[in-house]
Amino acid sequence: MLRLLRIPSSAIISFVKSLAIAWALLRFYARSVPSNWYRRFPFLPVPPRNFIAWRLHTAYGNQRPSVGVVLRDVWQLGVWLRTFPE
């Protein structure tokens, strides 16, 4: 007989929150990608380069942060975005 795994409720709650944050970030990404992106080179769904440059400049100034700092900030953005209705 299979024994059911005992998963702590705090782990389940943390996982659900992580999914909600990831979903908020995915929605934000979908909104920031230009329409008809597949018709223009480089044929990738990425936001315009000037938007990314402006966003990095407004967030960090002339300093280039490490990838870990950027990922932490993106995750915090997702936490903040999660508070808004779809």
Image (cartoon, grey):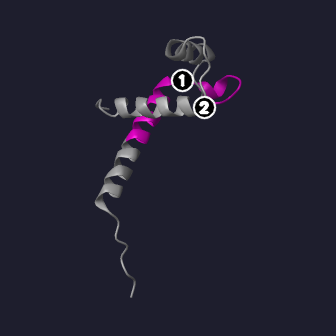
Q: Indicate the amino acid at tag 1.
A: Ser
Residue under numbered circle 1: 35
Secondary element type, mark 1: loop
In the rendered image, residue 67 lying in the magenta stretch gets the answer: no
Mark 2 vs mark 1, CA separation in Å: 28 Å
Q: Residue 45: where, in percent of width, then height?
A: 60, 30
In the figure, residue 84 lies in which quadrant? top left
Q: Which residue is mark 2?
A: 67
Nearest the viewer among 39 and 17 is 17
Residue 60's disc number: none
Residues marked 2 and 1 touching at CB (< 8 Å) = no
Q: Which residues are magenta?
A: 21-44
- Left or right, 85 with respect to 29, comes to left
Q: Main secondary structure of the magenta part?
A: helix
Picture coordinates of residue 22 (x, y %)?
44, 41
Identify the residue at horizontal 60%, vertical 11% (top origin).
Answer: 62
- Res. 40 image quadrant: top right
Q: Quadrant of the N terminus?
A: bottom left
Residue type at mark 2? Val
Q: In which quarter of the view is residue 75 placed?
A: top left
x, y percentage for residue 12?
Answer: 34, 57
Which of pointers 2 and 1 lies earlier in the amino acid sequence? 1
Is residue 42 a member of the stretch shown in magenta?
yes
Q: Is residue 1 above or below residue 74?
A: below
Q: Give x and y (percent) for residue 79.
A: 37, 34
Which corner quadrant holds the C terminus?
top left
Task: Name the residue at 68% across, 29% down.
Answer: 43
